[in-house]
Image (tube, rainbow, N blue to C red):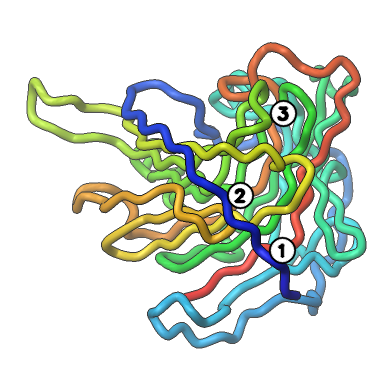
Amino acid sequence: MLHNIKKYVLGTLICLQYSCGSDSEQTPIDSEPTIDPPIDTHCPGTVSDGTPSGKNDVLVWADEFNTDGFPCRQNWDAEIGTGKDGWGNWEKQYYTRSNASSKNGILSITAKKEAYRGSQYTSARLVTRNKFDFTYGRVEVRAKLPAGKGTWPAIWLLGSDYTSNEWPRCGEIDIMEQKGWDKNTVLATTHWYEYGPAPAYVGHAEYSKNKSLSTSTTQFHVYALEWTSSSIKMYVDDQQVYTMGPAAYMPFDNDFFIILNVAVGGTLGGTSIDSDLNSSMEVDYVRVYQ
């Protein structure tokens, strides 16, 4: 599937600070009382037999979301529940499986105002953990973001060893995040644990840049990560937004997995939320090249 790509002027903002929003808690506190659909024996649009060239130009994994209903179970699991402290960010949604659904080649992750199991909002959070974990590559996600005030959409990677190497030590790469109160800007960020001899800074650190994008909720854009042993670069419609050269002690040389989610409220979602919230992040495809 080919798409024309428009180019935009970059607007950037750099920050390095101790506290920020990040989906740091991964373990659900509950299980949704539903029966999982059977795992597909074949998922249309899935690539699993590409041989990496090491130049990030060979398609090794993809989902074009041609499986109607919940997307291909060979590729994705759904996180369920509210997590610890709202997934570490005081988010207000209860994640369910039913809030993620594909139709006509488009995945919709929908945040809704609805009472469910003690929460006032529902949404969905999909992960490739233990299905597709990888080190280095080019990730491309073509998506249109939710317009609803208070929604916090994210396309990101988390270190696969997060259970034994707690966040932020496991590392996090946010290809795209958007604040709930600013739908004209997208952010690219990395998180890690900063080490340094006293009195140097030690603790959670982040490096972030943003880009003005007034059509983020009305048009599809391609959000991309170019990840190698020497650099992490992120793009919007092939326009570079972000670059960093990881230090040797940073955790960006290990396996990570992909996460797609829409949070409600919380650190980056904010306190002002649409009273009739029903807003979706639409995803055309996710592709990984190595």
Say the numbered circle drawn on residue 259: 2
In the rendering, at what x and y percent does residue 210 appear? 49, 37
Q: In the shown orientation, is residue 103 left or right of residue 158?
A: right
> Mark 3 sits on what residue?
151
Earlier-in-chain disc, 3 versus 2: 3
Identify which amino acid the numbered label 1 is placed on. Tyr
Check disc 1: other Cα within 10 Å, few if <14, some if 14-19, many if 20+.
many
Say the numbered circle drawn on residue 47: none
Check disc 2: other Cα within 10 Å, few if <14, some if 14-19, many if 20+.
many
Q: In the shown orientation, is residue 135 left or right of residue 152?
A: left
What residue is drawn where x is 36% and y is 33%?
14
Q: Residue furthest left?
A: 198
What residue is drawn where x is 76% and y is 29%?
94
Q: Is residue 23 above or below residue 35?
A: above
Q: In the shown orientation, is residue 163 left or right of residue 140?
A: left
SS type, badge 3: strand
How far is mark 1 from mark 2, CA to CA? 13 Å
SS type, badge 2: strand
Give the total of numbered labels: 3
